[in-house]
Image (spheres, rainbow, N blue to C red):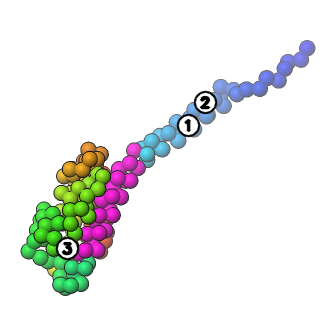
Amino acid sequence: MGLKNRGGFTLVELMIVVIVVGVLAAVAIPMYQVMPKRSRGTEAAAALGLVRSSMRIYYAEHGTFANASFTDGAQVTTGEILGVIDFDLLGKYFSTECYTFDGAPTANGYTIECDGSNSTSAGAADVADVVMTIDEIGEITNNW
C-alpha cells in the first residue's frame, strides 16, 4: 500500500504567509491613518486657493499685498476687502473662522493660515489638529 499524496500547506509555508501579511499590514495601516486627514484637508486647500486668487486680483488692482486690514490673526473675510465672503469659505469641516492672515502681509508677500481648531462647522472635531498655510507663490504647507 502506497502513501497517498496529501495536498495542503506545511507549517513553514503558513508562517511565511503570516509574516508577509504582517509586513503588509505594518506598512499599510500607518499610511491609511493619514489618508482621512489628507482628504479632509483638500477642502481647506481649495479654499486657500480661492483666497490666493483673490489676493492676486487685489495685487493686480493695487500693486501691493499690504493693507491696513491685513493684520496678524485677522480673518480673510474682514471688511470683504478681497471679495471673499463667509459663504465662500464655509464647508463641511472648515468654517470662516479658520482662515486668517498669519503675520502681517508685506507689499510683496503674505501667508494665510487655515487652523482647523478654530472651526465651527459640523465636522470640526475631525480637523482640530489640521493646520495649513499658503503663501504668495501658492505653496501650501500642512501640519498634521
Q: What's the mark number on residue 15?
A: 2
For the N terminus, the image quarter is top right
- Would you say 127 lies left or right of 101 here? right
Instruction: Name the residue at 40% across, 50% down.
Output: 35
Residue 144 counted in the magenta span: no
As helix, strand or loop, the secondary structure at mark 2 comes to: helix
Is disc 2 surrounded by few (<14), some (14 to 19) or many (20+) residues within 10 Å? few
Residue type of the residue flagged with mark 3 = Leu
Please state which of the two labelled residues, at mark 2 or mark 3, is closer to the viewer.
3
Q: Are marks 1 and 2 in contact (CB under 8 Å)?
A: no
Q: Taking 131 as reference, is 68 above or below it?
A: below
Residue underneath mark 1: 21
At which x and y percent is residue 102?
Answer: 17, 64
Is disc 1 surrounded by few (<14), some (14 to 19) or many (20+) residues within 10 Å? few
Upstream in sequence: badge 2 or badge 3? 2
Q: Label 2 to label 3, Cα distance in Å?
A: 62 Å
**28 or 65, which is in the foreground?**
65
Boundaries of the magenta span: 33-55
Residue type of the residue flagged with mark 1 = Val
On the image, which quarter does residue 73 sit in?
bottom left
Residue underneath mark 3: 82
Upstream in sequence: badge 1 or badge 3? 1
Residue type of the residue flagged with mark 2 = Met
Q: Label 1 to label 3, Cα distance in Å?
A: 53 Å
As helix, strand or loop, the secondary structure at mark 1 comes to: helix
Looking at the image, can residue 13 be seen? yes
As helix, strand or loop, the secondary structure at mark 3 comes to: loop
Q: What's the mark number on residue 141?
A: none
- Would you say 82 lies left or right of 139 here? left
Please state which of the two labelled residues, at mark 1 or mark 3, is closer to the viewer.
3
